[in-house]
Image (cartoon, rainbow, N blue to C red):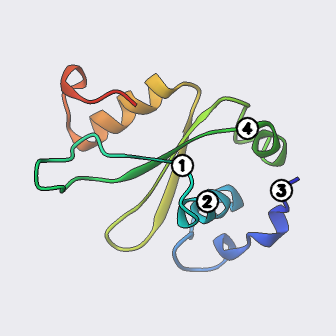
Amino acid sequence: MINKAKYDAHNHPGKFEGETSATEYFWNLVMNGDGEVWSPDMNDDGEGTLFDVFTVDADEANAWPDEFKIGDTVIIWECPQGFVTLCAYGTRAAAEKHVNAWVGITPELAPRL
């Protein structure tokens, strides 16, 4: 069971400002090395936008029923200014389409998640 009360930084200015406790929870997982690192625009020099990808499990869906369903795809990233953003999608394909559009990649040329 996830203790949502443990994640309260989003209530204060800073890295998680404007987000929910779910963002803090998933960022903690990222910091522990969990998730799938994905960069749809990585070049040969290793430069690109890094995203971490998760599939929502039952505990996470139960902890945040207004935000996720079991099997949703979560994309989380940190911007150059240090703020963390989380977006959730019903499918990996929807997540991929949104991220590829955001970074300006033609969907047909982008790597699959």
Callout 1 amino acid: Gly
At x 28%, y 30%, the residue is 111
Location of mark 1 (residue): 35
Q: Quadrant of the C terminus?
A: top left
Q: Earlier in the sequence, mark 4 or mark 2?
A: 2
- Determine the image quadrant of residue 98: top left
Q: Pointers 4 and 3 in contact (CB under 8 A)?
A: no
Which percent across, then down, holds residue 50? 34, 53
Q: Pointers 1 and 2 in contact (CB under 8 A)?
A: yes
Element assignment for label 3: loop
Looking at the rendered image, the disc whose residue lies closer to the viewer, 3 or 1, is 1
Element assignment for label 1: loop
At x 73%, y 38%, the residue is 57
In the depicted structure, whether residue 18 falls above or below residue 104: below
At x 62%, y 56%, the residue is 26
At x 20%, y 38%, the residue is 104
Which percent across, then down, holds residue 99? 35, 38
Which of the labelled discs sits on residue 2, or is there none? 3
18 and 79: which is toward the camera: 79
- Determine the image quadrant of residue 47: bottom left
Residues at marks 1 and 2, CA–CA distance in whole angstroms: 7 Å
Location of mark 2 (residue): 29
Location of mark 4 (residue): 57
Residues at marks 4 and 2, CA–CA distance in whole angstroms: 13 Å
Callout 2 amino acid: Leu
Return the residue found at the far bottom.
13
Q: Earlier in the sequence, mark 4 or mark 3?
A: 3
Callout 3 amino acid: Ile
Element assignment for label 2: helix
Callout 4 amino acid: Asp
